[in-house]
Amino acid sequence: MNWNNKLTHQLHTSYPIIQAPMFGVSTPAMVAATSKANCLGSLALADLDAAKCSELIKETKKLTNKPFAVNIFVHEIPEITNELKNRYSKTKNFLEELARQNQIEVILPEIDDIKVNSYQEQLDVIIAENCKIVSFTFGNLDQPSIKRLQNNETILIGTCTSVNEALILEQSGIDIICVQGIEAGGHRGSFTNEDIPQIGGLSLLSQVRDSVKVPIIYAGGIYNARTLAASKTLGADGFQIGSLFLCSEESALKDFEKQRIRNLEEDEIMLTKSFSGRYARGIKNNFIEAVENSDFILPYPYQNKLTGELRKASRAQKNPEFVNLWTGQSINQFSGKSTTDILEDLIKQVEKL
């Protein structure tokens, strides 16, 4: 297989393979290990404050001198109204009672104590640290930010879950589009419609390929040579992989979380809004069953901020029933090897195929 294409030239990698920016899972060490395999690592900054973003970028630079992407959330922040405050209070009471019933001691934050960071604050750090590849999800950058990053010669990678979103990104001047299939683990990158899409990832990939001219990265269900080759055939220039690294040596997941993932059955994987207020694909557990069809799901990011302390307390107790374990539909052996070895094994598989 000839790996060289426009994407490898743009990203300065030998292979057009991108390690997915999995917030809470990927680490600076995982980014560096990906770079060691001559692929593109992604540092997940999510909606962290500027100081933490700077700290993580500096830590990653100490581990690798190769290019890596930084990934940010570009969601709209809902206004805090009296209605939202009332809903928040009721949801907080419900979750604290649910925690008590399950022997989890936790005090959840009041809405006025929550700090929500905008991506504009992160851009100052990203530019100051001379990060030349920025990927983003949950929306599109505003035009002044796009121009600012373009003036800094920054490559922009936007996430779409529909043809319409892909067209919006291309028309905005985004350099590369990541097509996120419904098979992918973690949060959906949707921004024009938060309903679950009714189109499969590979069908979506083919339609986006017919609709845009910019390079395309495909994310969703890639875990071996055949799945990577299938996405290439349908028009992908690059391949974003996440779930394959969940139990890797560099993963931030705890041992009990990795063990739960390795015992996964296919009927346990689902899309849920219960932890964050946005659809994300992960492993069904007691928390999801208690919350998913209730009236106690706030809009993102307030649900995510509210449940954060509960998840932290559950991890401290090694309780997989109240933590979010995101994973895609493609179950695999979830290797504990280094990310570098996992990628090199995959590349060898593809070349044999």
Image: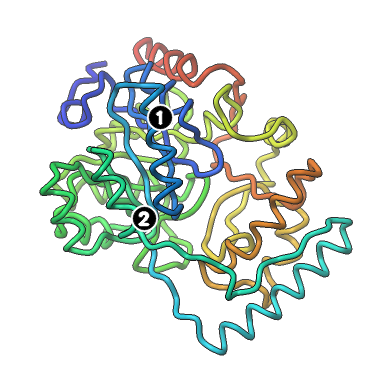
Name the side, left or right, on which 263 lies relative to 338: right
Please give the label number shown on residue 60: 1
- What color scheme is it? rainbow
Q: Earlier in the sequence, mark 2 or mark 1?
A: 1
Q: Position of residue 192 (x, y in %)?
A: 34, 68
For the C terminus, the quadrant is: top left
The residue lying at 47 percent from left, 65 percent from top is 116
The residue lying at 34 percent from left, 34 percent from top is 231
> Vertically, is 279 above or below 335?
below
Please give the label number shown on residue 161: 2
> Vertically, is 215 above or below 279?
above
Looking at the image, which is closer to me, 52 or 227?
A: 52
Callout in the foreground (2, 1)? 1
Q: Position of residue 49 (x, y in %)?
A: 44, 54
Name the side, left or right, on which 89 lies relative to 43: right
Q: Position of residue 97 (x, y in %)?
A: 83, 69
Please give the label number shown on residue 156: none
SS class, disc 2: loop
Looking at the image, which is closer to me, 156 or 282?
A: 156
User: How many angstroms separate mark 2 from mark 1 (CA)?
Assistant: 29 Å
Q: Position of residue 12 (x, y in %)?
A: 21, 25
Q: Confirm or deny contact between disc 2 and disc 1 (CB under 8 A).
A: no
The residue lying at 32 percent from left, 31 percent from top is 68
> Vertically, is 98 above or below 65?
below
SS class, disc 1: helix
| Three-letter amino acid code of the residue under disc 1 | Thr
Name the side, left or right, on which 277 lies relative to 314: left
Quadrant for residue 100, please give it. bottom right
| Three-letter amino acid code of the residue under disc 2 | Thr
Q: Residue furthest left?
A: 151
